[in-house]
Every structure is written in structure tokens, then in C-alpha cells.
């Protein structure tokens, strides 16, 4: 497997893992629970990491870039059909009630 992404922000790593799951990409999140007692480890050593199979690396990398807006326009915000919350376009599901985003146009 290859490490495709790491961030100190667990929410982003978790969201990206969910995006890969929706594409049926086998993925693994490491260091998810190593948040305390790090001792002498350098800070980046305990960041959550997202790993994928070697053959899925390029696709995963591209999806992550899309989600993070690195090389594509961020999709427009959408309004949740479940609870009416306004959701930023990069999210595939409502953070409040977990309803999925409407299909892409
Ligand atoms: Zn909702």
C-alpha cells in the first residue's frame, strides 16, 4: 500500500476516506487514535494517514485533489434535502444528518 494523504485534521482524513469508500477504493486510515502520549515522536508521525493499494494510488490521488480543490474548481454548495442545511460543495454528504448530496449535474 501507499500513503496517499496525511493531515493533522482528522475530519479531512475521515472525509477523504469516505470519498474513497464511495468509489469502492480499498483504503486504510492509520494513526486514527494516536492522539495523546506521543512522547518523543515528531508531530507529523502521529498525524492520521490515509493509505490505498498501489494500483489505486493514482485514482485516489486525483480524487483527493478534486475534493481539496487543488486542481479543479470546488463544486457549488448544495442544500441538504434531509434537513435544509447548506453544505459546502466538496462534501458528499450532509454533516448534520448524513443525507447524501444530490446527484452531480
Ligand atoms: Zn442534512
Image (spheres, helix red, strand yellow):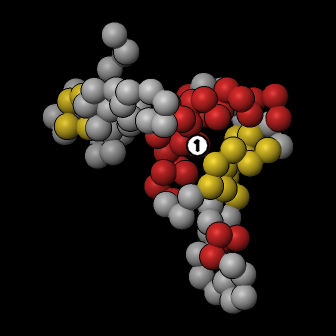
For the N terminus, the image quarter is: top right
Where residue 15 sits in the image (x, y, percent)? Answer: 49, 45
- Residue extending farthest to the top is 105
Determine the image quadrant of residue 53.
top right
- What's the residue at 32%, 32% (across, down)? 89
Residue 56 falls left or right of residue 100: right
Determine the image quadrant of residue 32.
bottom right
From what the image shows, is residue 64 above or below residue 32? above
User: How many marks overall?
Assistant: 1
Depth check: 92 or 66 in front? 66
Where residue 12 sits in the image (x, y, percent)? Answer: 48, 51
Q: Which residue is mark 1?
A: 17
- What's the residue at 33%, 45% (across, down)? 95
Residue 16 falls left or right of residue 37: left
| Disc 1 secondary structure class | helix
Q: Dot 1 surroundings within 10 Å: few (below 14), some, or many (20 or more)?
A: many
- What's the residue at 62%, 55% (across, down)? 6
Residue 63 falls left or right of residue 59: left
From what the image shows, is residue 72 above or below residue 96? above
For the C terminus, the image quarter is: top left
Amino acid at each position: 500500500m501507499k500513503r496517499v494523504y496525511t493531515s493533522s485534521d482528522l475530519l479531512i482524513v475521515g472525509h477523504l476516506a469516505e470519498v474513497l469508500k464511495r468509489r469502492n477504493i480499498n483504503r486504510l486510515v492509520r494513526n486514527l487514535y494516536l492522539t495523546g502520549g506521543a512522547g518523543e515522536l515528531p508531530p507529523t508521525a502521529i498525524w492520521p494517514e490515509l493509505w490505498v493499494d498501489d494500483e489505486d494510488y493514482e485514482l485516489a490521488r486525483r480524487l483527493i485533489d478534486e475534493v481539496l480543490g487543488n486542481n479543479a474548481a470546488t463544486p457549488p454548495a448544495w442544500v441538504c434535502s434531509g434537513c435544509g442545511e447548506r453544505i459546502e460543495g466538496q462534501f458528499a454528504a450532509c454533516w448534520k444528518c448524513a443525507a447524501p448530496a444530490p446527484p452531480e449535474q
